[in-house]
Image (cartoon, rainbow, N blue to C red):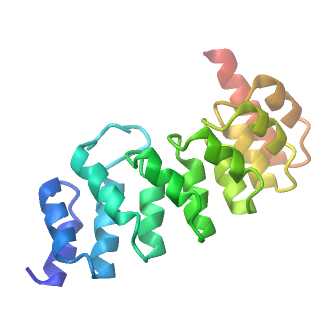
Amino acid sequence: MKKEEVLDALDNTELDMATVDEYYETFKDDTDVVAMVAMNLSRRTSVYERDREKSELMERLLVKLSDASDMGTRWAVAKNPHTPVAILEKLAKDEVNLVRALVATNPLTPQSCLVKFFSDEKIVRDGLSGNPATPEKYLKLLSADSDKMVRMRVAENPATPKEVLRKLLDDGDENVKKAAEVMLRKSVET
């Protein structure tokens, strides 16, 4: 198959996983195809259906893709809910802050990595603040972050303790206050 045909085929998330792997192996030195393989795997999963498409083959592909030179490919691996923990630990040290930020959002990221993200750049703290696996201690600290987007993500995080949400009701930013109100209301309803 020609590269253009492979790229078109990879646009289909119903494509057999073995075929996706075959395309990767055939074109693994082509950054366009490698990126499209990563995108194909990313689009097969969803926040609401985390176990969809989970397989050993997908995990093996994610491991291979984690070494890609292309930041977009590593980015797709970092956010994928099927990425093995060892790969998330590796990507947590990536030189590109956006890759680390997406590792910070992944609920499978180990606590040891999440703790290190607390002192990382703002974009990484933003990812950390929305991760329901972030330790409560850090959600409390992030609720006082100087960046309003970090505080808003803490307010929207389902793992944020009610005491922190109540504190965020007095935040100087209206959007942070509103997000805290919504989460407190939801916690009363459940």
At a point 87% along the width and 44% down the height, the residue shown is 144
In the rendered structure, the answer to whether residue 166 lies left or right of residue 13 reads right
Q: Position of residue 140 (x, y in %)?
A: 81, 36
At a point 48% along the width and 56% down the height, the residue shown is 78
In the rendered structure, the answer to whether residue 70 lies left or right of residue 3 reads right
Above or below residue 13? Residue 5 is below
Closest to the observer: 26 or 125? 26
Closest to the observer: 38 or 169? 38
- Quarter occupied by residue 93: bottom right
Answer yes or no: is residue 64 visible: yes
At a point 32% along the width and 63% down the height, the residue shown is 64
Quadrant where the N terminus sits is: bottom left
Q: Position of residue 14 (x, y in %)?
A: 17, 54
In the rendered structure, the answer to whether residue 176 lies left or right of residue 30 reads right
At a point 77% along the width and 24% down the height, the residue shown is 162
Closest to the observer: 16 or 12? 16
Quadrant where the C terminus sits is: top right
Closest to the observer: 144 or 148? 144
- Quarter occupied by residue 15: bottom left
State the residue lying farthest toward the left. Answer: 1
- Quarter occupied by residue 184: top right
Q: Position of residue 124 (x, y in %)?
A: 67, 58
Q: Position of residue 152 (x, y in %)?
A: 75, 46
Answer yes or no: is residue 79 visible: no
Above or below residue 69? Residue 87 is above
